[in-house]
Image (spheres, rainbow, N blue to C red):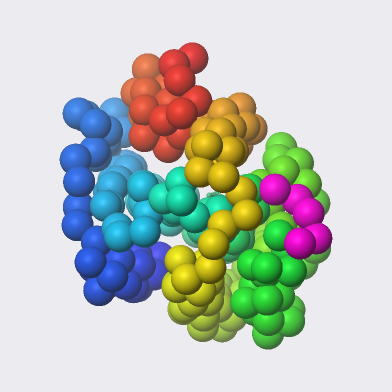
Amino acid sequence: MFDPFLDQLHADITARGGTPTEVPDGLAECHSAKKTSVIRSWLWQVPGFRRWRVTRLDAGDSLQVLNSVAYPDYGFDHPLMGVDLLWFGARQKLVAVLDFQPLVQNEAYFDRYFDGLKDLNRAFPDLNGEETMRSFDPNQYFSSWLLFCRGGSEQADTSLPPAFSAFLKAYWALHDAAINTPSTISPDEVKRLQENYDVYSAERDPAHGLFTSHFGKSWSDRFLHEFLFPASGQS
Ligand code: BLA
């Protein structure tokens, strides 16, 4: 379902000089006991970024997922890139979240970094359903201009493909502009805020129950704390 997006993401990363690096032992791929689902992950070293992770979960008709987070180098204070796409085939239900995840919530920061995403938000009203967040806090590490929809096949087939491409393009443009302008947040503080993103996300991420049901508790705990959000430490 999301393979064209995965290919596009990996092609962009490669074009930017990204090289694959080692995923911790046993976490790159896992099959469920019944062999009905598989989760695969990639870790990239990309110039300008200290970590870029990508995960694809294929559980056939029941669930398809593409999830990715890009963490800029500590010398850059611009937002993280966050993508979470889920397709529940049996119910024909799409959950799509695409955001420039802000390190801080203040006007100057938003003015500095969010023009691109604001444009996308206007261009794809179909993906901006003003959905309510049930587990995350919309005012921590999310922006008001995120593309967030709980929709169906219409959004998945019509709006999401052009939105995904435009989103990647806008994020690269943000990064290119940011590396040519001095950060206002110090590298030490960027480090603290990025690490706190991992702690916060590991606590709130609604995916853990889902992973546990497919891949068991011990694998899922390791995956959460060693791969998805490594600064969150062990549980
Ligand atoms: C929601 N993400 C969800 C949900 C699931 C996942 C099961 C609940 C569905 C719903 O709310 O309707 C699944 N999340 C996953 C999976 C992975 C994961 C499988 O991390 C890992 C492979 N989530 C992110 C990132 C963003 C994000 C990077 O991991 C940022 C764009 C957003 N996911 C996000 C949001 C919700 C969500 C905002 C809604 C949660 C809420 O209601 O608070």
How many numbered discs sit on the rendered protein? 0
Q: Residue at x 19, y 57 (%)?
A: 19
Which quarter of the rendering shows the N terminus? Answer: bottom left
Q: Residue at x 46, y 51 (%)?
A: 75
For the stretch drawn in magenta, the main secondary structure is: loop
- The reply, left or right, for residue 193 in relation to residue 15 is right
Q: Quadrant of residue 36?
A: top left
Out of 3 and 205, give the one closest to the viewer: 205
* Any part of residue 36 in sight: yes
Image location (x, y in percent) of residue 137: 75, 41
Image location (x, y in percent) of residue 221: 42, 22
Q: Residue at x 43, y 26 (%)?
A: 225
Q: Quadrant of residue 17?
A: bottom left
Q: Is residue 117 above or below residue 235?
A: below
> Does residue 207 show up magenta in the picture?
no
Image location (x, y in percent) of residue 222: 37, 23
* Any part of residue 10 in sight: no
Q: What is the magenta range?
A: 104-108
- The reply, left or right, for residue 117 in relation to residue 64 is right
Q: Residue at x 20, y 28 (%)?
A: 25
Out of 206 and 36, give the one closest to the viewer: 206
